[in-house]
Image (cartoon, rainbow, N blue to C red):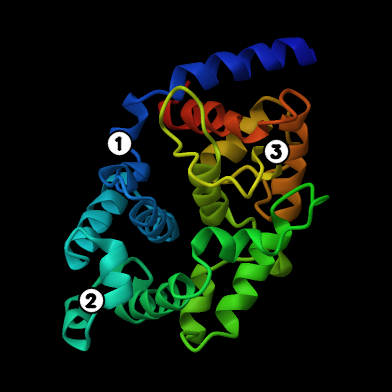
Amino acid sequence: MKPSALKSILETNYRQFNRIGFIEDDPITIPHSFSRKEDIEIMGFIIALLSWGQRKTIISSGKRLALIFDNCPYEFILNHTDSDLKKCLGFVHRTFNETDLLSLIAFLQLIYRNVGLEHAFSKHLGQNDLTVEAALNGFRKTYETSSAFVARTAKHIAWPGAGSACKRLNMFLRWMVRKDEHGVDFGIWTSVRTSQLVCPLDVHVIREAVGLGLLHHAKSDWKTALELTARLREFDPEDPVKYDFALFGRGVSGK
């Protein structure tokens, strides 16, 4: 397929699926229930980590989390008591359980008492970094060296250093960094450039990318995520990850 034809397909599907109606049936609906920057970050971060399996189940787990946090995530993270944490007991979403939730709450409290979640990622980026790879690696190391670290929870905070595609964290960063007139992504972070984002890889995105000739294999790892992003950058160097809407939307809709 000629590059011009491929770009036309991607642009058409990007406009088709990047719309307000996308929010209701996607996990991003959970952080969209909040207006405060920190609340959006916290709920976006945790719901992104829970984002595997059916979207309805993910959204249901997100609503349970909001109730645990009394619909005030930032206040809960900063000022919770031991009694408040009892509400976390029994929480489970697939392999994510109460131990993981308690660890993340403790970690987020450390972050917000120090630099904030945005800076916890962006402080690891250099001016000339082409992608967010250093931010993801640095964030993971920050968790590993924190007092909140729990070995079993580390699997939920993926990092390129281990070869992971980091699908969920790349999706979270897209939510926080991208901003356009359609209102799906939040665009509330300014210290990470849109051009540095890496495309989240899931089964839908990979299948569509292979079908369109953007990828020649279906392996899901960091190398593939960079490969796909580099191809998408050919069509929009400043905002390559906007085409995540096109690939994911095509895959989910069966287009």
Q: Earlier in the sequence, mark 3 or mark 2?
A: 2
Say which residue label 2 marks. Answer: 88
Mark closer to the observer (3, 1): 3
Query: In the picture shown, does residue 34 fall above or below 61?
Result: above
In 3D space, how far apart are the residues under numbered discs 3 and 2 (Cα atoms)? 37 Å
In 3D space, how far apart are the residues under numbered discs 3 and 1 (Cα atoms)? 27 Å
Front-most of residues 30 and 119: 119
Any mark on residue 244, and which?
Answer: none
Q: Position of residue 217 (x, y in %)?
A: 73, 42
Q: Is residue 254 left or right of residue 88?
A: right
Residue type at numbered disc 2? Cys
Residue at figure coordinates x 43%, y 23% from the top left? 182
Quarter location, residue 94: bottom left
Query: In the picture shown, does residue 28 fall above or below 245?
Result: below
Q: Position of residue 214 (x, y in %)?
A: 73, 30
Mark closer to the observer (1, 2): 2
Say which residue label 3 marks. Answer: 195
Any mark on residue 25, and which?
Answer: 1
Neighbourhood count class around disc 2 (C-alpha, 10 Å): few under 14, some 14–19, many 20 upward: many
Residue type at numbered disc 3? Ser
